[in-house]
Image (cartoon, rainbow, N blue to C red):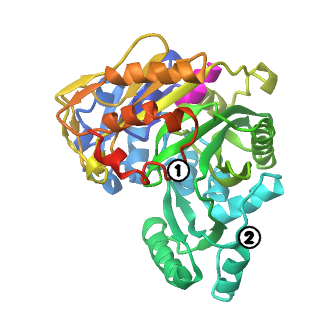
Amino acid sequence: MKKLLIANRGEIAVRIIRTAREMGIATVAVVSEADEFAYVAEVADEVIVIGPPPAGLSYLNHESVLRAAADTGADAVHPGYGFLSENAEFARKVIAAGLIWVGPAPESIELMGDKSRARRAAQDAGVPTLPGTQSALSDDDDVPSIAAQIGYPLVVKASAGGGGKGIRLVKSAESLLETIEIARAEAQAAFNSSEVYLEKFITHARHVEVQILGDGIDFVHLGDRDCSMQRQQQKILEEAPAPNLPDEIRKRIRDTSVELVRKAHYVGVGTIEFLYDPTTQEAAFIEMNTRIQVEHTVTEAITGIDMIREQLRIASGEKLGFTQNDIVFTGSALEFRINAEDPANKFMPSPGTIDVLTLPGGLGVRSDFGFTAGKSVAPYYDSLLGKIIVWAPTRQAAIRRSERALSEVDIQGIKTTTGLLRKLVSLADFENVKHHTKYIESDVDLIGGAK
């Protein structure tokens, strides 16, 4: 690998460029017209504009990205997360063009992208799963009977869904069929597939996940994370390792996650996501993400492993350079997503110019941002500005250090989630691990008081 094209933008593009530079790999940043003067354009070795601001005409345009690779002589493509990262068709085009695809095989993307098929694969590997349908619902199914057997509350999920989208809660039989039709319409619009399936809903669940890494022959896990602090099914605060997990549950989800990717002969990084029920102390599979995650940084913090480096090494044909026994987990790490949003106004996006951007420093504090002061936040894309990652020897020390680090953040000119994050990390419920995936939405005062 000599020259890497990053088919993404913002903080993840900057993150990939940094590791590539350390490895002696030249980088090409593709940007839309809205991002022509973005921070990533300053740190990449080459920049090429691939289209107008709308993502469909730029970052999601297969031909424009591939043309940029050809024009710049890039020999590899890294998709980051979001956009084209889990698009099997694009992965095939990259490979067909003779380029290195920094990601799993297109077949793996398709398997795990179909949530009902992924669920069956998880079951075959011994991964614990929630009660639910074995495949997508068909017109011949007796849906009310199936739902009654699963039990209420339950969720309707788009088979092609992801990123918290395509999910509808059903509390009783009266709203079942109507909700399914709504979910099908939403799934068709968002994912070009109307297939949905049913799954048991866990009230006050925690969201935990296992990071895996494989070269197609050897496979390891890099521990687990907790991503339970969410708003509107989007993660906002993550940590590693997941706190207050029973030892047997932690071992089971780690071991079965490795078995799942072993059976799939998986290549690259991936994340197996679970719901954990603190009441029953049971964990169950949700889905697998076949890409780098936003929250990969907390795993890096507790393992010392650069996951982007491992992606690039494996994509280049190298084998894993370590075994499971070589991986040492140290301390506790938290990640805070700083989004250009107004929590007090239903998390509405807050585009505009960043007048001031002061980020924290000090021992154990890392800031991964795709913006600097004076840069504009465009209204066309995801609102993530960057992330602050904090490590300390213990979880309690990491929380205290996080409070200090967040107190140093000063962002002016736009609204951000910084105030909400300061509140969340200082909560007794967070320190005592009493939070869950619906915690933020359940506290109106918490959101309304964030500035």
Q: Can residue 439 be seen in this view?
A: yes
Foreground: disc 1 or disc 2: 1
From the viewer's side, name the closer residue of 313 and 39. 39
**Is residue 76 visible in this depiction of the protein?**
no
Give the residue drawn at x 33%, y 44%: 383
Q: Main secondary structure of the magenta part?
A: helix
Instruction: Farthest residue to the top: give it.
Output: 363
Q: x, y percentage for residue 137?
A: 64, 78
Which residue is labeled 2 in the image? 134
Q: In which quarter of the image is the N terminus?
A: top right
Q: Mark 1 points at which residue?
A: 437
Front residue of 261 and 439: 439
The image shows residue 158, relative to residue 162, as above or below, that is: below
Residue 111: x %, y % from top left: 67, 58
x and y percent of residue 8 in the render?
41, 40
- The amino acid type, in three-letter code, at marker 2 is Gln
**Whole-number angstrom distance, CA of label 1 to CA of label 2:** 25 Å
Magenta segment: does it hold 309? no
The residues colored magenta run 297-305
Residue found at x 63% / y 35%: 242
**Three-letter code for the amino acid on which mark 1 is drawn:** Thr
